Amino acid sequence: MNELSLFRLYLLRALYLLVVVGLGIVVWPGVIHREQPWELMEGVVACMLAAFSALSILGLRYPVQMLPLLLWELGWKSIWLLVVALPLWQAGQMDAATWATASACLMGVIIPFIIPWRHVWAHYGVKRAERWR
């Protein structure tokens, strides 16, 4: 299998860095300096995003091995936009919070252009699976 170009590796690293810095600014201060208890889902989301940003640090060193992390990010954002935001938008029921989340998810539009799809297909689509027993 062909190795990825150095340019593609740097694009992946730039994407991981964007996640680390962006969520480091937005999410981590609230996780570290929280003064009040979290609402259930607010806490779940904050902790998942914090874990995502922490794991993205590994992506700076191992950009190819951490590709499933980017696939997860692309997956949840796509599902949320299709299942939650699109029906609300079509019904004319988007509130400010939903618009804010949709805007944040739409920034993920760069992810499919950076993911090396041939590599993903070769390693997760057609490559022989690991043994079960």
Image (cartoon, grey):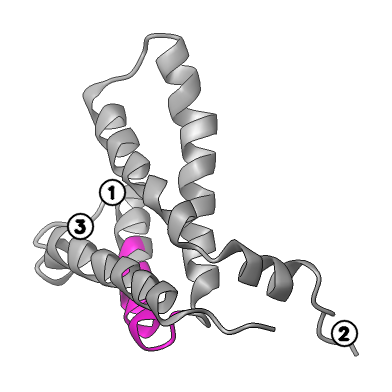
Quarter of the view holding residue 2: bottom right
Residue type marked 3: Pro
Q: Quadrant of the N terminus?
A: bottom right
Q: Which mark is residue 39?
A: 1
Quarter of the view holding residue 118: bottom right
What stretch of residues is rendered in magenta?
49-63
Callout 1 touching callout 3 (CB < 8 Å):
yes
**Residue plotted at (8% across, 61% down):** 35
Pick the front one: 12 or 36: 12
Specify whether residue 2 is in view: yes
Name the residue beneath numbered marker 3.
37
Does the magenta stretch mainly form a helix, a strand or a loop? Answer: helix
Pick the front one: 58 or 87: 58
Q: Nearer the viewer, mark 3 or mark 2?
A: 2
Q: Which mark is residue 72?
A: none
Q: Quadrant of the C terminus?
A: bottom right
- Estimate the x, y position of residue 43 in percent, counting from the top left: 31, 56
> From the viewer's perspective, is 96 left or right of 130?
left
Residue type marked 1: Glu
Judge the density around disc 3: few (<14), some (14-19), many (≥20) Cα neighbours within 10 Å: few
Examine the structure image and report whether residue 56 is included in the region drawn in magenta. Answer: yes
Mark 3 and mark 2: span between their CA atoms?
Answer: 42 Å
Specify whether residue 51 is in view: no
Q: For the image shown, how many numbered marks are present on the structure?
A: 3
**Residue plotted at (43% across, 73% down):** 8
The image shows residue 69, relative to residue 86, as above or below, that is below
Residue type marked 2: Trp
For marks 2 and 1 on the same chain, the one whose residue lies earlier in the sequence: 1
Q: Nearer the viewer, mark 2 or mark 1?
A: 2
Name the residue beneath numbered marker 2.
132
Mark 1 and mark 3: span between their CA atoms?
Answer: 7 Å
**Residue plotted at (32% across, 81% down):** 57
